[in-house]
Image (cartoon, coloured by chain):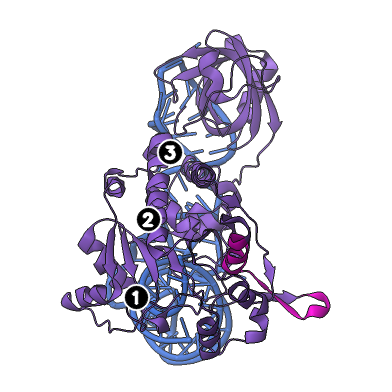
Chain colours: A purple, B blue
Amino acid sequence: MEGATVVPSPSGPAMNRSTTRIADLCHHVGATVTVRAWVIHLRSKGKLGFVVVRDGTGVLQGVVVKAEVPEADWAAFGTLTQECSVALTGEVRADARAPGGYEMGVRSLALIGASPLDYPIQPKEHGIDFLLDHRHFWLRSQRQAAIMRVRSELELAVHDFFAARDFVRCDTPILTAAIGERAGLFSTDYFDEGTAYLAQTGQLYGEALAAALGRIYTFGPTFRAEKSKTRRHLTEFWMIEPEMAWYDQDDNMDLQEDFVRYLVERVLERRPEELKVLERDTAPLACVSEPFARVDYTDAVRLVQEQGGALQWGEDLGAPDEAMIVDHYQRPVFVVNYPKEAKAFYMKENPADPRTVRCADLLAPEGRGEIIGGSQREDDYDKILHRLTEEGLPVEAYGWYLDLRKYGTFTHAGFGLGLERTIAWICGIEHIREVIPFPRMMGRLTP
RNA sequence: UGGGGUGUAGCUCAACUGGCAGAGCGCUCGACUGUUAAUCGAGUGGUUGGUGGUUCGAGUCCACCCGCCCCAGCCA
């Protein structure tokens, strides 16, 4: 139906005996059915009225003729308001004039839940702050619903991709004691154990699980208390973190490339209607079918400098630097082997150049920046202990993590993909806050 | 935390050099048997973010404060 790639219910016993989904109306042309839905638009022409409703699967126009419905129902039509919920019963017919291609000749109509006249969202432009204050209603819009369907498709695609490769999906704790990275942390009291921190990565636990199961991935919420206020940041976001035993960094990047390619192609294939609603020009996404670019950090620095950037070797890439690099290649780019100081303690020292570590960030095209950070992990006990000390991290908190190197150390690698950044890129949404149902960011905890 | 914006009706925005607070949409009432963000007629709507100051007079100028947006840092 309009704006959504909704699979019609299987024929046979009705999935819901009292209510027909709008997406299923194509199976009921000529039949009389009941649709329960929310009013999005009302128009009246004297003794003829139109009521357009949505039920999450599509949009239906009901045609109400005064002479063809009971008097009470005609009166009820006059009381309908935007976003009230209704039951419409009538005959389904195909009609090119109706949005969605089908309409209903309403024979009876009942108001289920009234909606007062001050419903805040109108079919017109609104400011972003107003919309976020009314996020619980904003999600009812066709555009927001399309984003949520793409999100759902991507989540399914993640599981399908890893299931096909025999990865084990593992869940890691959200309340943690040890610290994964250096970024900001949310904290809370935890009984007699002192302070607990909301997880900002499941990776360290993922490494332990990889030693137990071989290849694993996590898929869960993660929390960053950084005071970031850009369109790329959320304080609560969802991350997919695979961790693979016996993978080196090259194996790791090959997997990432297959993964990202699969995600993009899956949405293009299965959610074309949603992308159309979002007015996404899908041509730039076709670049994922080519091999991704791989550029050494040192070469990336030279590239930025040649284009007038002030970046110096040893510094992490800034957002404008990333943009220059991706614009140069016009497709996803791995920037590999960063300087040790710019990256986390657990990344494996590069044997070919010990000033650097075996890692890569994947930069998405169209100014999206980093969607993946990944690395081979340091598997040498002494070296990782040295790095912990160098970073000034509390070694005692990492006892169990160090044990992974002490008892049967193993080559392994993994990465983290930011779900929201990936959705925003694929959907062509400017700000990440639109691609999660209820965004958490600085200055916003409700709704 | 810095840099740059912005704040006027329920919403989106106007208001010249300081001179009566405006429009569209929405909403209410009325007309209309094929509307597509219908159309037409009538009505409804304000602590101009806050406090103080300059002035005969402040939405407009000044000071401070608050909210929000964009960018940067940090990162997925």
Give, as a three-letter code, the residue at label 2: Asp
Residue drawn at (33%, 69%), measured in percent from left and top? A336
Task: Verify CB contact (< 8 Å) between mark 1 and mark 3.
Answer: no
Residue drawn at (31%, 49%), measured in percent from left and top? A288
Residue drawn at (37%, 53%), measured in percent from left and top? A257
Identify which residue, A190 or A61, lies in the foreground: A190
Identify which residue, A4 or A319, lies in the foreground: A319
Please check the rendered image and state whether residue A197 is part of the magenta-colored stretch, yes or no: yes
* Mark toward the viewer: 2 or 3: 2
Q: Is residue A436 visible?
A: yes
User: Looking at the figure, which quarter contains the C terminus of chain A?
Assistant: bottom right
The disc, 1 or 2, on the residue closer to the chain's N-terminal end is 2
* Residue under pointer 3: A274
Tell me residue A395's x, y (percent). Answer: 62, 86
Real-space Cα separation, disc 1 to disc 3, in angstroms: 33 Å
Rate crowding at label 1 as few (under 14), some (14 to 19) or many (20 or more) other CA atoms within 10 Å: few
Q: Which mark is residue A318?
A: 1
Give, as a three-letter code, the residue at label 3: Glu
Tell me residue A30's x, y (percent). Answer: 54, 7
